[in-house]
Amino acid sequence: MKRNLLFLMVLILVAVFPVQSALAVAPSADDWADFKAAFDQAIDGLEADPDTAQGELANAQTIFDERFDLSDVHSSAKDRVRVAFGAAQSALSAGDRMGLAEQSEIAEKSALALIFTELEAALDAGRIEDANGWFAVMAAQLKLGQDHELTEQMNSLKSGTAAEGGATVIDGLALKLADKVAEELDEAVALADPDSPERDVAEARIKAAEGIGYFQAIAARVHNKIGLKDGSVVSGAVGSVYASLLDGDWELAAEHADIAKNELEEFAPHEEMSASAFDKGIADIQGILAAVRTETAAGNTEAAKHQAQDAWGAFVVVEPEIRRLDVNRYVAIEKIFPIIQEHPEVADVDELSNLFTEVAAVNSGEQDASQASISDTAITFFETWRHILFGLLALLGIYPIYLITKAFGWRHRAWRNIGIFMILLIIPVFMEALGRLGVEAKIETLQAFSFAVNEYAMLVWGLIMFTAFLFAINGLRAFCAQFGIEAIGVRQPEIDVPAPDSSDVETPVK
């Protein structure tokens, strides 16, 4: 009897514990909202009522422990959250509102690492209900609506297909998180820019802290994907952005942000720009165009031109994606932009803004791409591969310099100046090749070399051309002088006529 009772108890434990576990590991978006709200209330209430702030921070800790810290694994991820909680507690005790805000962001975003791994584990095990709970939290944080492709993919999963289809969801979320890391670092650097009228170093540090937290959510995947060494480079660069902002070194923060973003490109290599980054790029352009319209309507032509140049720089970032999406509208955009840059009119600005709205609709699937003509397709084909073309032109330009060197050497001053002239002509071609490569690969550092993108590069190009023409003039004038060719600005060498020899003079006959 006792044996049967013991056996029955074992069966109950085996049957009940998984159910309890399943019920326990299914948080909701509301739980996540409560977790975030507790942090916000602690930050907002610190100065007015430190005791209330202390209670709210403790509430955040309790929500985390009871709703999100349920797994016996992932100890390193849990340790990061707890370390951030400890730092937040220290900042609160010291009355440091900024430190509390920064550490709260790190704790909050680092908790996503646990949520992310729990979601992946639930999908691998085929536990759809649990997975839906964890996904709801991720969707709430990343603002994924019901019509988002990842949400639709998640909703389509059944118990039998969870493991197979879940991989697509996990990969998509990882890319979204990587985008968030880059986005937060960009915002942090922009907010800390000493030349920005909207400079806010405090907010920049919070954004950098958010970037750290988001990175923690995908740190393990980054290390597995690109290797421990490169993954450590990303981790160090993300942390260094925050540390540099603490030290007040904006340039170093910007440099580390570029390193982190470039390494993350290796983690998420895809030819198409992510939807969030593309939408943000279009929104940035339309925001600048709105300013162009305002200045144009007010008659401030020069200010409108300056803003139009900024809009062009923002357009270059999304240019390859627009060209891929809709060739016809891409060509129309490129035709209108120069007009606005030279002679801005409200009607032209409105037309350009509408084109970007239509492109965004094509990207989202709300509108079909327009039919492109043969000439537009040919031009677009050229522009797609022009970074390679400029590279080939630069390499081709080296050959005549080689021939000049072989034929005449560098001792002859005229030929030497002609050779320098040709070298200077090639430098801008190399610069444009690098710049167009930066546009195609979305590497901002390289984009700065293109004189079609960067005004400073155009200034350098003009100075190089001026110097090149001086060398050409000097060398060609020497040739003209050498061969006795008369030309404007060419001074012919004076020929010394020897004085007549007295012995050669005939003595007149008397």
Image: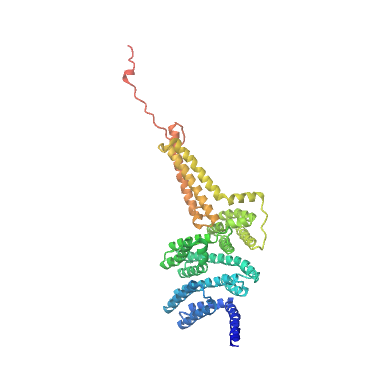
Pinpoint residue 29: horizontal percent, then vertical percent. 58, 76
Q: Which residue is at 57% across, 70% downward?
A: 120
Q: Visible in this render: residue 41? A: no
Q: Quadrant of residue 326?
A: bottom right
In the rendered image, the quadrant that contains the N terminus is: bottom right
Pinpoint residue 183: horizontal percent, then vertical percent. 52, 65
Q: Residue furthest bottom?
A: 1
Pinpoint residue 86: horizontal percent, then vertical percent. 45, 76
Q: Which residue is at 49% across, 40% downward?
A: 400
Q: Quadrant of residue 363?
A: bottom right
Horizontally, residue 72 falls left or right of residue 414, namely right
In the rendered image, the quadrant that contains the C terminus is: top left
Above/below status of 220 relative to 391: below
Q: Quadrant of residue 484?
A: top left
Above/below status of 130 relative to 360: below
Pinpoint residue 399: horizontal percent, then vertical percent. 49, 41
Q: Residue furthest top?
A: 510
Q: Visible in this render: residue 319? A: yes
- 172 or 468, which lies in front? 172
Q: How is the image coloured?
A: rainbow
**Total of numbered circles in the picture?**
0
Above/below status of 246 relative to 359: below
Q: Which residue is at 61% across, 49% downward?
A: 379
- 266 or 33, which lies in front? 266
- 510 or 317, which lies in front? 317
Q: Which residue is at 50% across, 48% downward?
A: 430
